Image (spheres, rainbow, N blue to C red):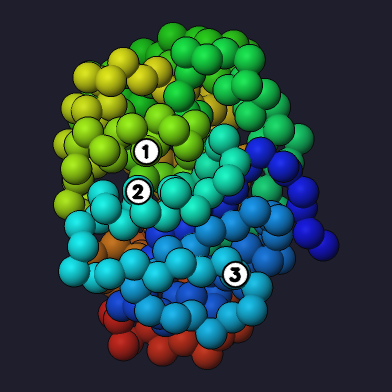
Amino acid sequence: MRIYMNNLTLFTYTNSKASDLHDCYFDKIKKYFNLQNQVVLCDKYINRDDINLFKYNNNSKYYEQIIEGLNKVETDYIIYSQEDYILFDYVDLNKLKKYISVLENDNKISFIRLIYSGIDFTPIEYNEELIYLKEDHQYYFSTQITIWRKQDFKDLFEKSKTETVWDEPKNSIYLKKLNKIGLCVKEKGKQIGGHFNSCVYPYIATAIVKGKWNYSEYENELNALYEEYNINKEIRGIR
């Protein structure tokens, strides 16, 4: 069943080097969060009829690819995602709508991180469900699942000119310079390493680490994918 949230787009960034993840990623999106508005960025064609694909030039910089993709988005808010952020349960639509309402009613807030991570400080409450993120934290910006104001996300990449997806610290510096205020959910799921699973958007965070399957943290979830999609985990290797 399609989910209609008129002012939200799921914005997925991927690359053909991760094509072995595409079926499981997009299938789980279709099952657990079949949002009407979706934009997928990839350097090559993906053979699926259920995605809205825009191809980017692999020779261009990451920030150029992101900005080009954002120009295709028609909503005010996005959820940024990547192909190894694989859902394993249904998205909590009521909470998602509640957090979008926060952005709609408080123009000072730029983004809401939907996973409790990067919190190694005593947080200050925004309300009973959300806390402020620390602006001078190395990972004030994170690629982990987050609701963003599209324009603020675009402003950030236009200023930072980040060349790779992994340079979160650089984006964090520019996010602070732009005086963008961010929040994070308080609710914690199961602890996995240094973070907690999201109760709003339950996904593997992340399925791939340094090119290998993140088996040490998500053994059960990955075993289910290996079986369902006949994946030979030895091809990528595990960690």
Q: Earlier in the sequence, mark 1 or mark 2?
A: 2
| Corner quadrant of residue 23 | bottom right
Residue 104 in the figure: left or right of residue 118: right
Residue picked out by circle 2: 67
Three-letter code for the amino acid on which mark 3 is drawn: Ile
Q: CA distance from mark 1 to mark 2?
A: 6 Å
- The secondary element bearing badge 2 is classed as helix
For label 2, the crowd category at 10 Å Cα-Cα, with few meaning under 14, some 14 to 19 and many 20 or more, is: some
- Residue located 58% across and 29% down the image: 187
Q: Position of residue 184 (x, y in %)?
A: 48, 26
Three-letter code for the amino acid on which mark 2 is drawn: Ile
Residue 149 visible, this angle: yes
- Count up the numbered dots: 3
Residue picked out by circle 1: 154
Q: Are marks 3 and 1 in contact (CB under 8 Å)?
A: no
Q: Quadrant of the C terminus?
A: bottom left
Residue picked out by circle 3: 51
For label 1, the crowd category at 10 Å Cα-Cα, with few meaning under 14, some 14 to 19 and many 20 or more, is: some
Q: CA distance from mark 2 to mark 3?
A: 19 Å
